[in-house]
Image (spheres, rainbow, N blue to C red):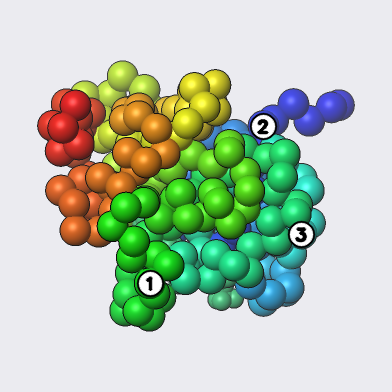
Amino acid sequence: MPDNRKALTILGAGKLGIVLAQLAVRAGYVVYIAGSAGAEKIRLTVQVLAPGAIAATADDAIRQSDIVILALPLGKYRTIPKELLADKLVIDAMNYWWEVDGERDDLANPQSSSSEVVRDYLGNPRLVKAFSHMGYHHLLDEAKPSGSPGRKAIAVAGDNQTDNESVAALVNDLGFDPLLIGPLHAGKQLEPGHEAFGANVDAGTLRQYVGL
Ligand SMILES: NC(=O)c1ccc[n+]([C@@H]2O[C@H](COP(=O)([O-])OP(=O)(O)OC[C@H]3O[C@@H](n4cnc5c(N)ncnc54)[C@H](OP(=O)(O)O)[C@@H]3O)[C@@H](O)[C@H]2O)c1
């Protein structure tokens, strides 16, 4: 029997990556997840915390799917194997958090969003920002089927409408109302220091936070 399930790759097997893997497995995706090292290092964690997801190396995980979520510390974006991501729809869930990432002039530019920095490094115009503003514990607790009362929202920012809509569909599958907030630059409003950062609210409230 052919496996008709959609595939999803997650780079980063920490707090956020593992929760997203759980939600995606629950939503029926085939999920490949990688940390910074070999698959062995994360295999037991994945087996226990995100059963059904497949631990892999980053290179192998990327080759398995057309959609790749970046869920690693932003300060390490230059370790991402960009040549393998050239044709992929890449979702940036990362934030600049100086306590983790250190003081970084390249990530603290007031003129550009951190996602634009990552897009320029990857050389991939299909980068879309999503899943970055809600804490992993809220993502885990709040995922609900479409149409549920009080369903929470996840903002989506990107430059290509088709890709934005693909990411919105993924957000919906994982348990949240997608809110398209504009081009990639608009993702700046989701960064630390802005009202939407940490938001665990419905679409109407999130819309107000980002000034829509
Ligand atoms: N925590 C949250 O609630 C939350 C919510 C939204 C967004 N975010 C953002 O998501 C990102 C990750 O946060 P986190 O809290 O999940 O961090 P974390 O728990 O420290 O996990 C980071 C993971 O990234 C892996 N990693 C590092 N370099 C990698 C590479 N080149 N390829 C693949 N994996 C790599 C690490 O592997 P090793 O352990 O092997 O180094 C680790 O598995 C951050 O940018 C954060 O701002 C976090």
> Looking at mark 3, is its residue's CB closer than 8 Å to ligand 1?
no
Which mark, by number, is residue 105? 1
Task: Provide the residue designation for mark 2.
Answer: 6
Please state the horizontal and vertical placement of residue 183, each as a whole percent of the image.
39, 32
The answer to whether residue 200 of the structure is visible from this angle is yes
Q: Do the residues under discs 2 and 3 have CB atoms within 8 angstroms?
A: no
Of the numbered discs 1 and 2, the one sitting upstream in the chain is 2
Quadrant containing the N terminus in the rendered view: top right
> Disc 2 versus disc 3: distance between alpha carbons?
19 Å
Closer to viewer: mark 2 or mark 3 = 3
Q: Are marks 1 and 2 in contact (CB under 8 Å)?
A: no
The amino acid on which the numbered mark 2 sits, given as a three-letter code, is: Lys
Q: Name the residue furthest front.
A: 111
**Labels 3 and 1 touching (C-beta < 8 A):** no
Check the image and report above or below for 70 versus 40.
above
Look at label 1 and name its amino acid.
Asp
In this view, the residue in front, 170 or 78, is 78
Seen in the image, is 127 located left or right of residue 178? right
Q: Which residue is mark 3?
A: 59
Q: Amino acid at mark 3?
A: Asp
Question: Is residue 154 something that shows in the picture?
Answer: no
Residue 134 in percent (x, y) is at 30, 50
| Number of numbered discs visible in the structure rendering | 3
Please tell me whether residue 109 is drawn above or below residue 9 in the rendered image.
Answer: below
In percent of the image, x 26 and y 35: which residue is there?
Answer: 152
Measure the C-alpha gap from mark 3 to mark 1.
29 Å
Residue 205 in picture, x, y percent from top left? 14, 32
Q: Secondary structure at mark 1?
A: helix
